[in-house]
Image (tube, rainbow, N blue to C red):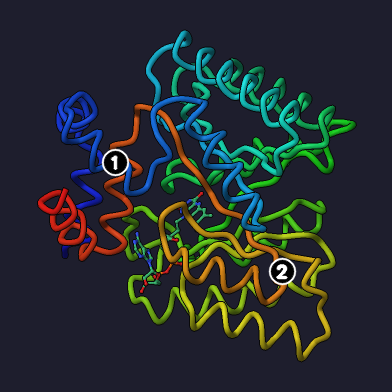
Amino acid sequence: MLRALFISLSESRWLRAVAEKSILGRRVSTRFVAGPELEDVLRATKLINQNGATVSVDNLGENVTNAEEARASAQVYHRLLDAVSSQGLQANISLKLTHMGLDVDESLARELVSGLVAKAAALKSFVRVDMEGSPYTQRTLDFVHQLHRCPGNQDAVGTVIQSYLYRSEKDVNELLAAGIRIRLCKGAYKEPPEIAFQNKSDVDANYVKLMKTLMTSGIYHGLATHDERIINEAKTFATREKISPNTFEFQMLHGIRRDLQQQLVKQGWRMRVYIPFGTEWYPYFMRRLAERPANVFFIAKNLFRS
Ligand SMILES: Cc1cc2nc3c(=O)[nH]c(=O)nc-3n(C[C@H](O)[C@H](O)[C@H](O)COP(=O)(O)OP(=O)(O)OC[C@H]3O[C@@H](n4cnc5c(N)ncnc54)[C@H](O)[C@@H]3O)c2cc1C
C-alpha cells in the first residue's frame, strides 16, 4: 500500500513543483542525488572510480513538455560526455526518452538521442536508455532497436528490462537476437496485474530466470539490484558455469547499500553505480521511497540530527 502511495505521489506535478523549490526538499534529496550541478556529479564519479567501481550518470528529469527543455537536457548530456572524457573518468550515461522530448515530438527525441549515441560511440562511451512506465515500453524498445541498427552504434547503446512485466522474456530474446546490451532490474513503477507480476516472489523468480539467460548470452549486461539473495545467486551461478566476472557487471544506485557495493568490488566483481544529479529530483526520489518506505524514517532522523 505504501509503495502505491509513494508512486502516486511521485506523479503529482504540484508536489513536485513545491518540493523541488524548497530548501528542505533539496536537503533531503542529497540522500540519493549527487547534487544540483554537473561539478557535483563529476566529483562523486571520481570518488566512486577511486573506490574501484564505474559509474552511469543520470541527468535527472522526465516528461518534459516542450522542445526547449528537451534540447537543454541533451546539451547537459553532451557537456557531461565531454567532461567524463577529458577528465578520464570511468563513466557512461543513462537517459530517459521522455526527458529527450518523446511526449512532445518523437522525431525531436530521435534527433537528440541519435546525436548523443553518435558522440558516445566516438568517445568509446555508452548510452543506456532507461525504461519508464509501461506506456513507454514498446516505444522505448523500438527506439533502441532502431538506434542500434545504425552503423557505428553497436557498442554505444543499450536499454533496460523490468522483471515485473510478463512480456520481458520475449523482449529479452528479441534484444539478445539483435546483440543489444541489457540492464536487468525489477521495475520501479506501479503496473496493473494484467501486465505485471504483483507479488515480490514472482518478480524475483522472473529476475533470476532472465538473469541466467543474460549471463549465458555472451553479451555484456548489467544486473541492477540491491537484493543480496539474488546477487549471491548470480555469483554462485557465475562460478558454477565458469562465467568470467569480466563478462557482466552488477549495478546499484548511488547512496544505497554502499557496504555491498564495496564488498563486491573487493571480491573482484564489476560494479557500476548509477548517480543522478540535477534539480529535478522529485519523481526519482519518491520512487526510492516507494521501494523502501523505511527510508522516510531514516531521512527524518538524519534531519533532526543535523
Ligand atoms: C542501476 C539501476 C538502474 C535502474 N534503472 C531502472 C530503470 O531504468 N527502470 C526502472 O523501472 N527501474 C530501474 N531501477 C530500479 C529498480 O527497478 C528497482 O526499483 C530498485 O532497484 C529496487 O529493487 P531491488 O532490485 O534493489 O530489490 P528490492 O527487492 O526492492 O530490494 C532488495 C533490498 O535492497 C535494498 N533496497 C532496495 N531499494 C532500496 C532503497 N530505495 N533504499 C534503500 N534500500 C533499498 C533493501 O535492503 C532491500 O531489502 C534501477 C535500479 C538500479 C540499481
- Residue 160's spot in the image, x, y percent? 59, 52
Name the residue: 58% across, 22% down. Answer: 109
Is residue 140 shown to the viewer in this render?
no
Residue that protrudes farthest toward the front in the picture: 306
Residue plotted at (65% across, 20% down): 78
Classify 205 as above or below 94: below
Label 2 packing within 10 angstroms: few (<14), some (14-19), many (20+):
many
- What is the quadrant of residue 208 in the picture? bottom right
Q: Label 2 CB, ligand 1: below 8 Å?
A: no
Q: Residues within 10 Å of mark 1 (few under 14, many from 20)?
A: many
Residue 277 occupies quadrant: top left
How many angstroms separate mark 1 from mark 2 (CA)?
Answer: 33 Å
Please give left or right for residue 73 compared with residue 211 in the image. left
Q: Amino acid at mark 1?
A: Ser
Q: Which residue is mark 2?
A: 214
Indicate which quadrant contains ligand 1. bottom left
Give the image location of residue 44, x and y in percent.
52, 41
Q: Nearer the viewer, mark 1 or mark 2?
A: 1
Label tally: 2
Q: From where the camera sits, is residue 212 visible?
A: yes
**Farthest residue, direction bottom:** 240
Q: Is residue 40 above or below residue 75?
A: below
Foreground of the two, 30 or 108: 30
Q: What SS does tag 2 mark?
A: helix
Residue 29 shows which numbered tag? Answer: 1
Q: Quadrant of residue 288?
A: bottom left
Secondary element at tag 1: helix
Q: Locate residue 188, reporting x and y percent.
A: 39, 55
107 vs 53: above or below? above
The residue lying toward the viewer, choosing from 42 and 243, is 42
Outermost residue toward the left in this view: 304
Q: Is 261 on the left-hand or right-hand side of 62?
A: right
